[in-house]
Image (tube, grey):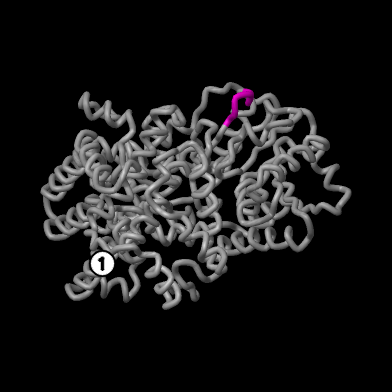
Amino acid sequence: KLGLLPGLGGTQNLHKLVGLQKAMDMMLTGKDIRPDRAKKMGLVDLVVAPQSLERVAIDIAKGLADKKIKKSVGKSSNKSLMDKVVEGTPFGRNMMWKKIDEMVQKNTNGNYPAPFAIIDSVKYGLEHPEGDAKYKFERESFAKLAATKESEALIGIFDGMARMRSHEFGKLAHPINKVAVMGAGLMGAGIAQVTAEKGYEVLLKDRDMASVGRGESYISGNWAKKVKRKRMSKFQYNSNSSNLVPLTDDMESWKKHFAGADMVVEAVFEEINLKRKVIAQCEDVTPDHCIFATNTSAIPIADIAEGAKRPEQIIGMHYFSPVPQMPLLEIIPHGSTSDSTKAAAFEVGTKQGKTCIEVKDVPGFYVNRCLGPFLVEVSALVRDGVELETLDKAIRNFGMPVGPVTLADEVGIDVTSHVANFLSKADLGARMQGGDISLMENMIEKGWLGKKSGQGFYTYKGKEKTINSEVQAYVKAFVKEDLHLKEKEIQDRIMSRFVNEAAKCLEDEIISDPVVGDIGLVFGTGFAPFRGGPFRYLDSVGVDKYVGMMNGFAEKYGPQFEPCQLLKDYAAEGKKFHS
């Protein structure tokens, strides 16, 4: 996760404790190991209750010193027959290394040097078991990795995450214990889930029992999967479930429940008048200290807060879908938002397990504002003859987890189109030009809403996705001229729109600094982690070189590619965003 390998003999000694296959899985994935599994596999000798840890540790230390307790040798010697065949024979090892190489190549696309260095270090140790040569090889490999730009990028993300855990807004005016969530759709249910999991009492409200029931089913289904995979105990499942209180409009009791709410998070339809109506309803029944957070994806918070009784207690908390999986939370105060309200939003978001960034109150905020030009360029590239699957492949090869076509399907064609339409009418000017977002508008009319409807750009059947003949014909009719673009130009066209908007956000103080910008796009969109985010990427490529490329595109394709003033200034002065 830091672009390094387990040093101090880690690559040489771990497999002696837990066996070669388990050791490789741990080192190559960085997965957390549950205590019970760690004990079973021989990674640890004892698992004790926290309150007993100090006493047991002292007793064990004395026992080892007195030689009354023998030093553990792990359980790698106690292997199953299959493990002995795989790890202990030339044929088995060859097959194992082949599978490991295939897995690493598939998961990293060759973009991360650390996994390959780990494999080489372990292999060297197995081939040179005697003496210290294997430790020297490991040390030298570690030093080489530490000097790579990939490691620098990943460590930058790690340090940035640590910085985002703190804020400068002081203490809460009132503790947050009970959180109400308005709207039990996919977003509302996801917000309710991550909130209930952290011990908050959650009031989940929607218009009727059918709507609330769908939200409850989504949440309980997610928890049931965790229990099945042993990521959650049955006790935790029951405890979380008891934190969730379903409510509907026709229940008179909802007002009594809301009278004890410390925070309300609304996740209703993206329509400003509806959101204002929800605020008015909540202000009538909640206590004076209650904070109201809106989960809008693009509407300015100041506009939503207009006419509210307590505007200083209104703030934006923009979650990303699916909420339980996406790690980013944009926190958007408007001009009148108090510091204690900001502090409450950061505390709740951090407790929910999110990495929180503060963003200025503008249309689209930060992440969606960057996605706007990105999405427009997708339509421009389709118009220029780039096939959907080619587009997806090109951006995956750049390092993004999914391509833009798949991303639109997963977010929802209707949601994606709404954001693109909203931003095209906002303040981005030429930066939202150059494409034709009617490509998605017409799909909505056809009912092609993406993965959730089974049909978007791709057709979804179970885990398979294909492009059917009707979609192919629709996209082909959209093409004006096939420019036969190479993969590099496809990548540069779409990513430059993305990166330029991030730089423009920094120029306009929508984000406070490059670290926030990098963290926001890595965790909000999956921007290639090994590149470190848009600003580290610019530093790596060279801002002057990138500006030159964009100027070339501007001459060829239009003003939507003109680099922002901040990029021009950095290019002229030879500056970097990170020292």
Quarter containing the C terminus: top left
Is residue 162 shown above or below 524? above
Say if 238 sits above or below 285 in the image. below
Seen as rendered, the residue at the extreme front is: 480
User: Residue 536 appears at what percent x and percent y?
Assistant: 29, 37
Is residue 28 or residue 324 the one in the foreground? 324
The answer to whether residue 54 is visible is no
Q: Quadrant of residue 473?
A: bottom left
Q: Residue at x 26, y 59 (%)?
A: 109
Q: What's drawn in magenta, residue-wise?
A: 333-338
Residue 49 image point, x, y percent = 55, 46
Where is residue 293 drawn, in percent x and y?
Answer: 65, 38
**Residue located beneath label 1 in the image:** 102
Name the one closer to the observer, 365 or 237.
Answer: 365
Q: Amino acid at mark 1?
A: Glu
In the rendered image, residue 335 lying in the magenta stretch gets the answer yes
Foreground of the two, 319 or 121: 319
Is residue 544 covered in magenta?
no
The secondary structure that dominates the magenta segment is: loop
Q: Quadrant of residue 93?
A: bottom left
289 up-or-down from 207: above or below? above
Name the side, left or right, on which 412 lies relative to 17. Answer: right
Residue 561 in the image, given as x and y percentages of width and height? 31, 42
- For the residue labelled by badge 1, is the local secondary structure a helix, a strand or a loop? helix
